[in-house]
Image: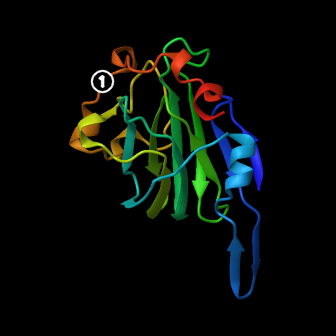
């Protein structure tokens, strides 16, 4: 497993070794010991999967305290542009984002810690997206950030008129209205070490 740092040190890209031949392939999609060596201790409690078509954008989502979530995300089929936005007030990277092309061929994964909003845009005809969470989904604490907030400036790689979002995601607040994540409480070394 290769671990690649991103522009924001707390967000990591995991690229597993894929062993393939004419019969198919094998990979280790998750190993606790390697994960803990690079991130720290995380107990995943829920796995989720979604299927979406080209141009579907899901996000930018997070859960408010005390039900915050970290996610390890990957694509099982197709390809997506995956995005993590630092929403930790006072962070040196506040308001910045990391983008990563996740695809089923490379089988790479993105680690999105607590204190980040997360979303993805489907670039292939269809995509199956899977992720591990370290906290359960809590509808009462479900929240989001506006996907096209100019204060963040995400380049989504396809024209805006081709992007499809849910009614809920179309009316999420801008970055300046998110106030649940003080940096001192959501530093990686405090949460996972």
Residue 12 in the image, given as x and y percentages of width and height: 66, 40
Label 1 crowd bin: few (<14), some (14–19), many (20+), radius 10 Å: some
Q: Is residue 177 above or below residue 111?
A: above
Above/below status of 111 relative to 28: above
Q: Quadrant of residue 179?
A: top left
The outermost residue toward the bottom is: 23
> Which of the 4 image quadrants contains residue 103?
bottom right
> Residue 184 at what x, y percent from top left?
55, 15
Q: Nearer the viewer, residue 107 or 134?
A: 134
Q: How is the image coloured?
A: rainbow
Residue at the image position 75 percent from the left and 44 percent from the top: 37
In this image, 3 relative to 164: left or right?
Answer: right
Instruction: Name the residue nearer the viewer: 85 or 52.
Output: 85
The residue labelled by disc 1 is: 173
Name the residue rendered at 42%, 35% in the picture: 68
x, y percent for residue 93: 59, 19
Quadrant including the C terminus:
top right
The picture places residue 149, in percent across and down from the top left corner, at 39, 24
Image vertical order of residue 170 relative to residue 164, above or below = above
Q: Looking at the image, which residue is at 40% across and 20% down?
A: 175
Q: Nearer the viewer, residue 37 or 118?
A: 37
- The quadrant the N terminus occupies is bottom right
How many callouts does the rendering have? 1
In the shown orientation, is residue 107 left or right of residue 97?
A: right
Q: Is 90 left or right of 145, judged from the image as shown? A: right
User: Which residue sits furthest top?
Assistant: 90
Secondary structure found at label 1: loop
**x 75%, y 77%: residue:** 20
């Amino acid at each position: 497993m290769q671990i690649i740092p991103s522009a924001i040190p707390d967000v990591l890209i995991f690229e597993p070794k894929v062993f393939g031949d004419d019969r198919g392939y094998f990979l280790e999609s998750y190993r606790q010991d390697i994960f803990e060596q690079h991130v720290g201790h995380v107990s995943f409690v829920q796995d989720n999967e979604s299927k979406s078509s080209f141009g579907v954008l899901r996000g930018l989502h997070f859960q408010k305290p005390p039900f915050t979530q970290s996610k390890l995300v990957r694509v099982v089929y197709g390809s997506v542009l995956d995005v993590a936005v630092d929403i930790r007030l006072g962070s040196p990277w506040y308001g910045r984002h990391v983008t990563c092309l996740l695809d089923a061929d490379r089988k790479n994964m993105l680690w999105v810690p607590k204190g980040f909003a997360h979303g993805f845009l489907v670039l292939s005809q269809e995509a199956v997206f899977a992720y591990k969470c370290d906290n359960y989904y809590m509808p009462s604490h479900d929240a989001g950030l506006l996907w096209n907030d100019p204060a963040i400036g995400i380049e989504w790689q396809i024209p805006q008129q081709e992007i499809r979002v849910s009614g809920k995601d179309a009316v999420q607040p801008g970055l300046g209205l998110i106030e649940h994540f003080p940096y001192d409480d959501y530093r990686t070394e405090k949460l996972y070490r």
